[in-house]
Amino acid sequence: MSNSTAQQQVTIWWRFPAKLISYLLHPLFMPIIFMGWLSLRFSYEFSGMDEIDMLKRLVVVFVNTVFFPAFVVFLLWRLGFSDNILLRTQKERIIPYIATMFFYWWVYYLSRNFTDQPLVAKAFFLGSFICISLGLIANSFFKISMHGMGVSGLFTAMLITCFVYEINFGLDLTIALLALGITASARLLLGEHSNAQIYLAVAVGVISQVIGFLYVLS
């Protein structure tokens, strides 16, 4: 067996877990993951909310940051505006970016009026909106990694939250950092992005969350 054949077999073998990771750690899931983490680790910050109320709040986040953006992508695919739901080209990503910007801004706007929600949640939603906005701009020039922006934003938000509350959730941060590395590796293995597109996406995700937290917590 030649080296090239062996390398091809290894690549094929790893494509399934790489795709699975890409689905499980899709950027649309980052807001609901962050809110779920907050509700578990900082439940005392959601004053006056019982388990049912907290579940309703998570449902609101899920509907606006996962369901509606995903539904827009599905409609674009069914109406023939995109070849598939994976949005592999820059052109196919324009409308989903704009739609997601709207939904993320709406969630941030709602969170500003919630008195029973921690400031770090509001900062995260603002940072996510900024991230999507920068992603739309970058998409005009190159295919920036949405996965890279999403997971790096999640890790940054968790890290800043730990600093704000002066609590060391080392295991949580380690898992988030590993998720970032694994996701970036999966996207590279699938050939969806170049190294530069991944690095820039991570930078955008980090910077966006820092801006969001500085603005809200200042």
Image (cartoon, grey):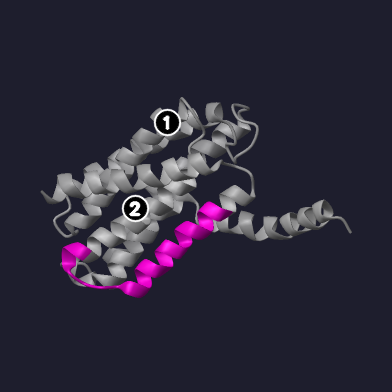
| Image mark for residue 60 | 2
| Image mark for residue 138 | 1
Residue 87 in percent (x, y) is at: 57, 36
Most foreground residue, 27 or 52: 27
Q: Residues within 10 Å of mark 1 (few under 14, many from 20)?
A: some
Q: Is residue 197 left or right of residue 65?
A: right
Q: Is residue 69 left or right of residue 53?
A: right
Mark 1 lies on a secondary structure that is helix
The magenta stretch is 163-185
Q: Nearer the viewer, mark 1 or mark 2?
A: 1
**Residue plotted at (45% across, 45% down):** 199
Most foreground residue, 93 or 80: 93
Q: Amino acid at mark 2?
A: Val
**Residue plotted at (29% across, 40% down):** 106
Residue 178 in percent (x, y) is at: 46, 64
Is 175 drawn above or below residue 83 in the view shown?
A: below
